[in-house]
Amino acid sequence: MAFLSIRMHSVRKIFSHAFQDEDNRLLMASSPIFIMHVLALGVFFTGFSWAAFLALVVTYSVRVFALTAGFHRYFSHRAFKTSRLFQFVLGWVGTSSAQLGPMWWAANHRHHHQYSDKEEDIHSPVVKDAFWAHIGWVLCRAYGEIQQDRIKDLNKYPELRFIDRFHVLPVLSLILVLYIGGAVLNAYFPGLGTSGMQFVMWGFFVSTVLVYHVTFCVNSVTHIIGKKRFKTDDESRNSWWVALLTFGEGWHNNHHRWPFSARQGMYWWELDLSYLVLRGLERLGLVWDLKVYPEKIYEEARMQPLEVDQSS
């Protein structure tokens, strides 16, 4: 109970600091992300159905995978190879999460790795604060431009440039699919108690808000709370519960030690669902050349002292 009380006090301090800052209040009030949170309240008007809840689970799971395996491990770190068609699919589905396109996402993430927890890092909770790292930087219009010099390898694909330029299209396509799906179920299976708008509310708005916060936790939580296996020059940490919510992204200290790996959990007990799915896709021939931690990294891990929880 004392641990929970300390955590709740920390959360209250973070949000208290955020709302006291006038620039933060203005950013939140004018941001599409803030509007997304407000619109998600529509679930109280469209009601609940198990079909709509299933839509939430599916859209959450598919898009988290597209972000973790696609935007992060593939577009940002080139940790495996795939075809242009499946590359496009990963880009389109990931962009439906309303986090802009793969090129913008990869450019900012590569910048983060170059300057992790240094003054130049655009979302470090160490340099600034947890609110800024979690969501504040996304609200800031100064970071809306794509750093083209960081993504020259992606710029050669016109289909990726198209997705980044018209990033609203994947979002609208998901909303349309959900609305049609809910309407069709209502027409043919009225006993399910669903509707087009109910599917949109649960499958897009609520799902998107959840996807926002679990992926943002990698920027904030895993640089504050958790265990450090490796002595990196930043404050990256391993967090098992962030790993569960993000399908493997919580093994962040591992990742910062060797960011080129398609696998982030180093051992069987470090569950990395995204990597397991990638292995399945590898068997289907959709991806190949999955990079993993080399033996020297495992040897280094064995030489380190027992992990220490630095969350306090």
Image (cartoon, rainbow, N blue to C red):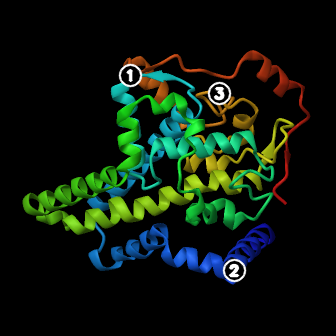
* Crowdedness near tag 1: few (<14), some (14–19) or many (≥20) residues, C-alpha within 10 Å: few
**Label 3 sits on residue:** 260
Q: CA distance from mark 2 to mark 3?
A: 38 Å
Q: Point out residue 300 in the picture as x, y percentages from the top left corner.
A: 84, 24
Q: Secondary structure at mark 1?
A: loop
Q: Are marks 2 and 1 in contact (CB under 8 Å)?
A: no
* Crowdedness near tag 2: few (<14), some (14–19) or many (≥20) residues, C-alpha within 10 Å: few
**Label 1 sits on residue:** 83
Q: Point out residue 243 in the picture as x, y percentages from the top left corner.
A: 62, 45
Which tag is nearer the camera, tag 2 or tag 3? 2
User: Image quarter for residue 152?
Assistant: top right
Q: Which mark is residue 235?
A: none
Q: Point out residue 89 in the picture as x, y percentages from the top left corner.
A: 35, 35
Residue found at x 60% / y 80%: 25
- Amino acid on which the number 2 mark rests in the picture: Asp
Q: Secondary structure at mark 2?
A: loop
**Label 2 sits on residue:** 21
